[in-house]
Image: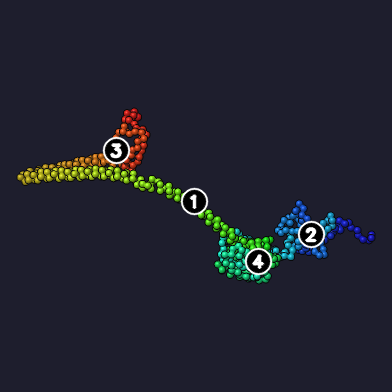
């Protein structure tokens, strides 16, 4: 005994700890087993054991790693964990420090599915903006599912009960197993070319492996690119595949897909009946209102005597016509007077010209009787007289022109229309001109005639000339 080296427990445990934790083979191990003795205290750390038929291994998963587990974990679940072997010094216990966890058995498939889901999500295939609206009353429905399956029977029975008026076109295809995804894609292409209102892609429940064809990338992209709205009902309520994310509507079950795609014919009939009652009531109310309105209008004075609408206008038109004729006649008289004055002026000017011409001829005849010297003097005198004559003629014409313009201005000034153009107006009461404020009383209605248009006014107060002077 003395020949053997004696070591303490802690030293031995520390040595074993160093050997195990320093071994690269024991780092990032993948271990598969069944969870047992799971404890999750308030600290957020997980304490459990992984066991199989022959052994059990203590495990610790700290809160920072446990938060990354995206699926429910319970005792009895089979999982695959990744971690490092470590030794807990106080108890000398070997344990596995778990850093990641995934479902057991299907772990590789699960990781593959998650990676593909992230890829399609990043490309926008799951965006709600790309989802097509479902028709309210589809009459042509395409059904893509397995032949002679429970899902097909459930869909057809539900369609017959819920919406028997629709025409169903089936596109049977394998819904599980190798190559099923390609066959489903082919069936969807045919259905999309069938000019349907909506397409149902359904399958009954099963394991992840059974439903794996509905996680195919090509199938997901095909559903996304469909021109016809697609409703999926794959598996049971807890099953979700990639086609559910890219379809226009996802239902929990095949029966749920039918309920989402078509209305209930009994509810539609009831709704139509309710609409008919509402329409009848609304029409009756409208007719009653219109009938009352018609009675009220037919008893109105306007319908009894329609001339009320234009009687006053006709009288007003006659008054204006008479005033227009009177004003036109006065203007015609002024025009005739003006033409007469113009003719007189022209006659007087011509007469004066004849007189001056006669005098000029007399001077010329007299000149012929004088000598050349006298003729020269007479010629000079004649030139002077001719110049004076021209001046006199110009003076006479200018004087007559000024007189004519004066007469024309007077005529224009005395025109009643011209007076109105200068801002004045004519006040009439009972179609008679008002020239004295004494003839007006308070609240009398008078008509104001302007150069353009007229207006009616009510007399508030009259002002005598004495008050004007004081003002």
- At 69% across and 67% down in the image, what residue appears? 210
Under tag 2, what secondary structure?
strand
Q: Quadrant of the N terminus?
A: bottom right
Q: Residues within 10 Å of mark 2 (few under 14, many from 20)?
A: some
**Which callout, 1 or 4, points at the residue further toward the start of the chain?**
4
Q: Residues within 10 Å of mark 1 (few under 14, many from 20)?
A: few
Under tag 4, what secondary structure?
helix
The location of residue 222, given as percent across then percent down, is 60, 66
Q: Are marks 4 and 3 in contact (CB under 8 Å)?
A: no
**Numbered mark located on residue 285 in the image:** 1
- At 55% across and 56% down in the image, what residue appears? 274
**Marks 2 and 3: which is nearer the front?**
3
- Give the distance between the C-alpha atoms of the residues marked 1 and 4, in whole angstroms: 51 Å
**Marks 4 and 2: which is nearer the front?**
4
Under tag 1, what secondary structure?
helix
- Give the distance between the C-alpha atoms of the residues marked 1 and 3, in whole angstroms: 55 Å
Label 4 belongs to which residue?
A: 151
- At 60% across and 62% down in the image, what residue appears? 162
Q: Quadrant of residue 65?
A: bottom right
Label 3 belongs to which residue?
A: 432
Q: Is residue 120 above or below residue 377?
A: below
Q: Is residue 308 above or below residue 142?
A: above
- Give the distance between the C-alpha atoms of the residues marked 1 and 2, in whole angstroms: 74 Å
**Which callout, 4 or 2, points at the residue further toward the start of the chain?**
2
Q: Quadrant of residue 385?
A: top left
**Marks 1 and 3: which is nearer the front?**
1
Q: Is residue 438 above or below residue 131?
A: above
**Which callout, 4 or 3, points at the residue further toward the start of the chain?**
4
Label 2 belongs to which residue?
A: 36
């Amino acid at each position: 005994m003395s020949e053997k080296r004696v070591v303490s427990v802690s030293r031995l445990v520390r040595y074993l700890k160093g050997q195990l934790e320093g071994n690269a083979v024991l780092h990032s191990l993948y271990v598969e087993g069944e969870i047992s003795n799971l404890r999750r205290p308030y600290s957020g750390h997980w304490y459990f054991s992984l066991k199989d038929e022959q052994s059990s291994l203590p495990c610790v998963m700290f809160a920072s790693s446990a938060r990354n587990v995206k699926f429910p974990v319970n005792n009895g679940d089979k999982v695959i964990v990744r971690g490092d072997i470590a030794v807990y010094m106080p108890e000398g216990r070997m344990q596995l420090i778990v850093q990641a966890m995934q479902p057991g058995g299907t772990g590789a498939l699960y990781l593959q599915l998650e990676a593909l889901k992230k890829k399609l999500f990043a490309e926008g295939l799951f965006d709600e903006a790309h989802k097509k609206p479902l028709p309210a009353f589809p009459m042509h429905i395409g059904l893509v599912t397995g032949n002679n399956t429970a899902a097909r029977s459930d869909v057809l029975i539900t369609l017959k009960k819920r919406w028997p008026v629709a025409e169903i076109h089936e596109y049977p295809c394998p819904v599980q197993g190798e190559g099923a995804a390609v066959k489903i894609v082919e069936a969807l292409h045919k259905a999309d070319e069938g000019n349907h209102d909506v397409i149902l892609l359904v399958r009954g429940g099963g394991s992840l492996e059974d439903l794996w064809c509905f996680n195919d990338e090509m199938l997901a992209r095909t559903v996304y690119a469909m021109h016809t709205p697609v409703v999926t009902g794959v598996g049971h309520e807890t099953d979700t595949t990639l086609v559910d994310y890219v379809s226009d509507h996802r239902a929990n079950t095949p029966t749920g897909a039918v309920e989402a795609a078509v209305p209930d014919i009994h509810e539609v009939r009831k709704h139509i009946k309710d609409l008919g009652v509402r329409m009848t009531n609304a029409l009756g109310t409208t007719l009653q209102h219109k009938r009352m309105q018609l009675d009220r209008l037919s008893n109105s004075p306007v319908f009894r005597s329609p001339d009320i609408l234009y009687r006053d206008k006709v009288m007003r038109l006659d008054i204006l016509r008479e005033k227009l004729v009177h004003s036109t006649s006065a203007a015609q008289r002024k025009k005739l007077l003006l033409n007469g004055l113009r003719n007189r002026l022209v006659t007087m000017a011509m007469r004066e010209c004849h007189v001056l011409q006669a005098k000029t001829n007399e001077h010329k005849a007299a000149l012929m009787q004088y000598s050349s010297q006298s003729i020269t003097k007479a010629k000079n005198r004649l030139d002077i007289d001719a110049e004076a004559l021209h001046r006199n003629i110009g003076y006479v014409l200018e004087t007559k022109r000024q007189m004519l313009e004066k007469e024309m201005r007077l005529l224009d000034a005395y025109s009643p229309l011209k007076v109105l153009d200068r801002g004045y107006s004519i006040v009439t009461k009972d179609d008679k001109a008002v020239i004295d404020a004494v003839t007006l009383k308070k609240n009398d209605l008078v008509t104001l005639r302007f150069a353009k248009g007229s207006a009616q006014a009510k007399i508030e107060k009259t002002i005598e000339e004495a008050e004007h002077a004081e003002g």
